[in-house]
Amino acid sequence: MAIPYIVRRKADVSSGERKELWYAVGKKLQKKGGKTERDVAHQVAQRTGFHRGVVEAVLTATGEIIEEVLSDGHSVTLRGIGSFQTAVTSKGFEHPEDVLPHSVNLSRVYFKADRMLTLAVKRAGCHRIPFKYYFPKELLTKKMEQADKEAEKEENGFNE
């Protein structure tokens, strides 16, 4: 398995002058929403032998518990998965006693993946989706068509 990407042109202004360069951009191969807890529960049930309904109930309860724990001001760390944490913000005040609860807001809930999970996903590598699937035919160059053919041969194990 490899992480799919497409190639897009973006403006690079980091050097002070505007340059149009090509970059890899992650591409999800799914409709909006991705995999659900039902999908994950099905896969966990297949691997563990537990009933899918039980696994789905555990996943749902885990989400509810993470919500409760974060709301109490704690972080949650799930070994092999990662950590969930909160960040708060407020506007600035001249005196510390003026920073009251009604002026403080949750700015985000964030997730930091476990280091081993990150390494495992990195090992999956990346795979370019063939240009022919997202570039209009009139914009495909000979080099792009050749790159698609070579990638297809390599993917099928027919590397010459």
Image (tube, grey):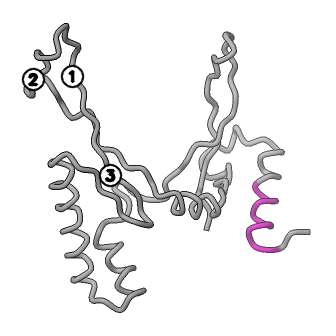
Where are the magenta residues, as a range? 148-157
Q: CA distance from mark 2 to mark 1?
A: 9 Å
Q: Secondary structure at mark 3?
A: strand
Three-letter residue code for mark 3: Phe
Q: Secondary structure at mark 1?
A: strand
Please identify the residue farthest to the right as the structure is shown.
160
Q: Label 3: how many residues lie within 10 Å, few (<14), some (14-19) or many (20+)?
A: some
Mark whose residue sits in front, 2 or 1: 2
Q: Label 2: how many residues lie within 10 Å, few (<14), some (14-19) or many (20+)?
A: few
Q: Which mark is residue 90?
A: 1
Could you tell me how many numbered marks the image carries? Answer: 3
* Mark 3 and mark 2 residues within 8 Å of each other at the beta carbon: no
Q: Is residue 152 magenta?
A: yes
Q: CA distance from mark 3 to mark 2?
A: 25 Å
Which image quarter: residue 62? Answer: bottom left
Q: Secondary structure at mark 2?
A: loop
Residue 21: x and y in percent read: 70, 28
Residue 72: x and y in percent read: 15, 49
Residue drawn at (61%, 47%) of the image: 6
Q: Which residue is mark 3?
A: 84
Q: Is residue 129 above or below residue 51?
A: above
Residue sitting nearer the eye, 133 or 80 = 80
Q: Which residue is mark 2?
A: 100
